[in-house]
Image: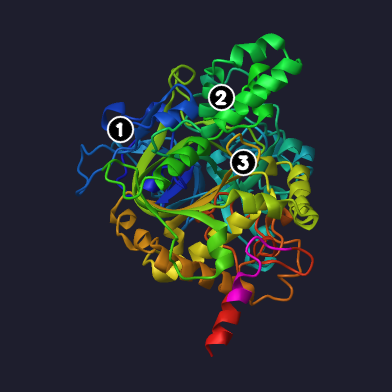
Amino acid sequence: MEKIRHDLRLSETISPFGVGSIVDVRGESLMAPDTSWWDKRSAREISCERLLARLGAGILKQPPTHTNRAGKNTPALPYWRFPAWRFCERCDKLSKLTGKKLGKWSNTCDCGGLLVPMRYVTVCEKGSHVQDVNWVQWVHRGRAAGLDEAIRFCRDYKSLRFRKLANRGEGLTSLVVKCHGCGNSRSLAELVSKGALQRDGIRCAGRQPWEPEGAVKEPCPHPLAAVQRGATGNYIAVRISALDIPEERSHAVEATDRIRGHVFFEKVVTDNGGPQAEMVAGWIATELGVTPETVLAVAAGEEVGADEMLLDLKDGEWAAFLKKLGGGRDLTGSDFVVDSRSLEGIAGPRRLLDAISGIGQVRRVREVRALRGFRRHDVDAAMINADLGPDQWRRPTYPAIELFGEGIFLRFDEEKLVAWEAQPEVQARAGILKNRRADSPWADQLDMPEPRYVALHTLAHLLIRRLAFASGYASAALQERIYANSDRADRTAGILIYTAGGDAQGTLGGLVRLGEPEKLIPLLVSALDDADFCSNDPVCIESDRQGSSQLNLSACHGCSLVSETSCETGNRLLDRQLLLGGSDVQGLLDGVLAEVRRGMGDCS
């Protein structure tokens, strides 16, 4: 491989130009091979124990970077030329990349014209493999070609031409590949029809372009589909990120330890669920401030509130935030600095202030993002690991970057959430999204859309849109992290809006400054007011079928959607009615705007 110097932002090496993606650079079409091709000496190792605990055994490596102008020996990422087939802009000759001229790859035709990569490649529908279209085989196949022996046995690949016929309009029928050796030609319209490649006998090779042919041990049984080279579905990155937060034991785990350490706990275990066990469990529960059912469950051997960090990184983050919220000003000076702020004495609508039980100004936070692998064509396709080398099963290398930033954390009152969620109308409204999530073949990768999640998720979007006006950050620079789950031993109910970048964008201070309660409460009111009337109303507010796979209810671009890179779920699971209320359902913050407007009327 020849080194082509081209600057990418560090974050782009994870997505969208990570391992397995196609990158267009200076007229060349390149693909990033897996991390086994990296020069490991020039890739800095990143430490994040929380993330590695989720990924399993492995190493996090940051792609090679440089600060000044790249030189000949500057560390760089390798890229593979793909597709290998190209056509000349001047003479239309179709050729395959096979050699070098004067020791370098040539991007010019013999006639002096510029060679352009072919527009179509083939992608395995379920195996996530990709390969060139075998244009020689394809142009000499087809129903008409099978009747003529001269065409069937022609293999004159040097006579192939790729042309646009002006008399056929502007569609794919006007794009034709023709063999001047035998005279046969086919339009690209025949290439993209369903099952066309299978009918022509073109099968999946079962590998990635940079892998040698001997790397395939078993043939791939899945069909191929012809797709445009730059189609977004050709590369679906599978990423994972974690905030570098000191792990804290949840309250439920600590309560379990206290129960087991109680002097009377052995009597509960010995009685094995009898009447004495219930009585003694009541004593323990009263003394420790837990329920008798919790004591009996621990005695029965159930792991109540067991640490589930491997299942969800957010559990440890939530416990760490709760510890910070009770500590006032944070003077630790670590990579996780959160100042706890009180709402006492803050002016604002009572309904909003009562719903919020804590505010944290996140002055410093470190986020680590890693690329596990990628899929092609379909989210249900097989995942290809980011490391395909011989060490992939023992200690794989994951591309990763670290970013530093700031943010605002909001905790909501659990008792008020539970009372609101218990309403049948609220459950029915969220049940619409639950059913659609269950019916979708891929939506199980999203969070469960229980009422608290949908309401807090929608509020996070509204706040991001409002903060983009006041913080100095672009909306796409802000990220969300939703903590809203009622089936954990420690129920979570909060949101984190933060920004993180590898440069100064992540540490400007404009976001954490707005976390002061005197500024944040008016911003929240303004965010709710922005969403009270959508430019697409009444269609939007009366709708329950919007967004991808209809996984949004009353939420559209005019009121609730943000950049997809800012959202955990790609702008899905949103509903203004569960937040602000509607004709048949009470919203979580229903009445806040009415209270504000009544106060304004009293003042006038």
Q: Position of residue 117 (x, y in %)?
A: 49, 49
Q: Position of residue 206 (x, y in %)?
A: 60, 27
Mark before the other along the chain sequence, 1 or 2 = 1
- Tell me the magenta residue range: 586-595
**442 is higher (above) or lower (below) than 248:** below
In the drawing, does residue 64 fall left or right of residue 574?
Answer: left
Q: Are marks 2 and 3 in contact (CB under 8 Å)?
A: no
Q: Quadrant of the C terminus?
A: bottom right
Label 1 vs label 2, nearer the camera: 2
**Residue 16 magenta-highlighted:** no
Mark 2 surroundings within 10 Å by alpha-carbon count, few (fewer than 14), some (14 through 19), many (20 or more): many
| Residue receiving disc 1 | 43
- Say whether residue 587 is magenta: yes
Q: Which residue is mark 3?
A: 122
- How far apart marks 1 and 3 lie (CA) works out to 32 Å
Residue type beneath disc 1: Ala
Residue that label 2 marks: 256
Q: Secondary structure at mark 2?
A: helix
Q: Can the viewer see residue 213?
A: no
In this rendered view, identify the residue nearer to me: 540 or 263.
263
In which quadrant of the rendered image does the N terminus lie?
Answer: top left
- 431, above or below 537, in the image: above
The residue nearer to you, when weighing 152 against 477, is 477
